Amino acid sequence: MKMEYQDLQDGVTRITLAGDLDARGAGEIDLQFQAVVASRSKVVVDMEQVGFLASIGIRTLIQAVKANAGKGGKLILLAPADPVWKVIVTCGADSLLAAAYDFEAAVAAVS
Amino acid sequence: MISRPPSPPSAEITLTGSLAAIGEAGDWLAAWLAPRSAPADLAFAMRLCLEEALANIVMHGGRDESAAISASLAERKGAFILSVSDDGVPFDPVTAETPKDADVGGNGLILLRRYASAMRYERETDRNRLTLVFSLPDGRSTPDR
């Protein structure tokens, strides 16, 4: 799995994930992902290129959103594919993870 | 007309109790599904359940990397059958309670129950065996069968 991030204007950070957020993928990005999220306050996680999500990936996302919120930040998922969002909803994790489907809406949600 | 050799109707794999082995198993499943023209949502469900079943064994099975895990795939009329066997502590995913908090684990059990069409657990000769059934749409058989 690949992870890139970019600090944009107004303190917003866009993290782009690409690949499968399964046991292998989560293991590949978890350390860097948690570190970046924990040190930023307005985080948009672009999920458009994530094709698969398993429970270990949900745990990665929830740990990040909780750490971010604990420091007064906000995190939102951008454009998760329908099967990926369905996994989140099935687990009830949509009570902790929010999603937006265009970038402007995502930025507004974390600002 | 190009003919292709029929893909084996069943397959087996032996795995160790490591997170890396889960990725290996996902590749194995994808290779088995590739010639079968499985609908995307069915392939997603099978991969998710394989991942969750193995993750549960690796993280909660009470064994280290010496755990002996095996998985098999088979076709039946109108369904694909995934079976996972391990020598860890007895654990029945069919009846186990799930934690109430979404972030403390238990999501794997929820996903197994939601994404498999049917599931059965057996404890046989010191091994757990979990059998998962995935019904094909409208009970159709796979191509070439």
Image (cartoon, coloured by chain):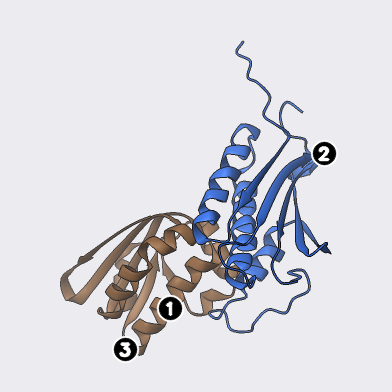
Chain colours: A brown, B blue
Tally of marks = 3
Alpha carbon separation for disc pair 2 and 1: 42 Å
Find residue B99 and report its horizontal and vertical position in percent: 64, 82
First of labels 3, 1 by sequence position:
1
Pinpoint the chain carrying mark 2. B
Quadrant, the N terminus of chain A: bottom left
| Number of the label disc, if any, that sits on residue A63 | 1
Q: Mark 2 points at which residue?
A: B77
- Up-down: is B19 above or below B76? below
Q: Residue at x 29, y 71 (%)?
A: A107
Which image quadrant for residue A30? bottom left
Quadrant, the C terminus of chain A: bottom left
Pinpoint the chain carrying mark 3. A
Q: Answer left or right for B97 relative to B28.
A: right
Residue type, mark 2 in image? Lys
Q: Is residue B134 among the parts visible in the rendering?
A: yes
Q: Nearer the viewer, mark 3 or mark 1?
A: 1
Residue type, mark 3 in image? Gly
Q: Answer left or right for B143 relative to A54.
A: right
Which image quadrant for residue B108? bottom right
Label 2: state its secondary structure.
loop
Label 1: state its secondary structure.
helix
Disc 3, disc 2: CB below 8 Å? Answer: no
Q: Which of B62 and B80 is in front in this view?
A: B62
Pinpoint the chain carrying mark 1. A
| Number of the label disc, if any, that sits on residue A72 | 3
Q: Which residue is drawn at 55% across and 81% down?
A: B104
